[in-house]
Image (tube, rainbow, N blue to C red):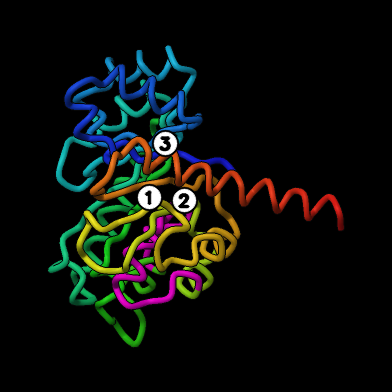
Amino acid sequence: MTYSIQLYTLRNAIAEDLPGTIAKVAEIGFTQVEPYNFVATAKELGAALKENGLTAPSGHAPLLSQDQDEIFAAAKELGITTVIDPFIAADRWQSAEDIQATAAALNDAARKGAEYGIRVGYHNHAWELESTIEGRTALEYFADLLDPELVLEVDTYWVAVGGQDPVDILTKLGDRVKLIHIKDGPLNTDTRAQLPAGKGKVAVLDVVAAAKSLEVGVVEFDDYSGDIFEGIAESLAYLNAADAAAATEGAKA
């Protein structure tokens, strides 16, 4: 398994010192990052990634509210091959008609992305799981409306906060899920209470195992009350240790 870090986690540090923050990410042991707001920072970010030997397989950008050509051009410059829309407001997930319109707009975005050789995806919050459409969560209803080439990046923490079992949702969504956000905590909306992976109420390893077509696991904190660099280092160490233990068990079998 390869792990990435969502750079929104480090937004305060990036605002103060982007190159220094990227260097710290590399020192901690990450080899991949998931940028946000990358149109504005493409040149500086690209230079920092190159200098530290990091890649950015995915990135977040508001595809339905900003210039798509500008987004895809910046993504291509950074080597991002999957652009994920990270946020569509809760009021757009309450009716079948609104969800159908969102899916159609993302399908259009995916066709434009394909012209740049870039795949399009969507990242959820809690409300897509709290809303029910025709007996299923809004996220499941939405997934069935997407063209085959679109992917999902499931934020497993917000799935749980939304009242659903992340393992169950990942199983239902199946091969559509190519990325997940890995985070932990008390399963409430207090983002500063979030914790390093393995320290909260999420069955992190079960969640990772449930994503059968996973390409990248993305570590993220929406916020954190401690030292954020220590937090992401703890998460990565937990995940790497679990992978190492699994590999050892596999070798014995």
Q: Nearer the viewer, mark 3 or mark 2?
A: 2
Q: Position of residue 129 (x, y in %)?
A: 31, 73
- Residue drawn where x is 18% and y is 69% of the image: 98
Task: Say what amino acid the circle numbered 2 marks.
Answer: Leu
Discs 2, 1 touching: Cβ within 8 Å? yes
Crowdedness near tag 1: few (<14), some (14–19) or many (≥20) residues, C-alpha within 10 Å? many
For the residues labelled 2 and 1, the Cα–Cα distance comes to 9 Å
The residue that label 1 is drawn on is: 121
Q: Nearer the viewer, mark 2 or mark 1?
A: 2
**What is the quadrant of residue 158 in the picture?**
bottom left
Q: Secondary structure at mark 2?
A: strand
- Residue drawn where x is 26% and y is 29% of the image: 38
Task: Say what amino acid the circle numbered 3 marks.
Answer: Ile
For the residues labelled 3 and 2, the Cα–Cα distance comes to 15 Å
Give the farthest residue toward the right: 253
For residue 37, above or below residue 211: above
Crowdedness near tag 2: few (<14), some (14–19) or many (≥20) residues, C-alpha within 10 Å? many
Task: Say what amino acid the circle numbered 1 marks.
Answer: Gly
Discs 3, 2 touching: Cβ within 8 Å? no
Q: Position of residue 85 (x, y in %)?
A: 28, 48
Q: Which residues are magenta?
A: 145-167
The residue that label 2 is drawn on is: 179
Q: Secondary structure at mark 1?
A: strand
The answer, for residue 76, to whether it is visible in the render is yes
Going from N to C along the chain, the mark reached first, 3 or 2, is 3
Mark sitting on residue 118: 3
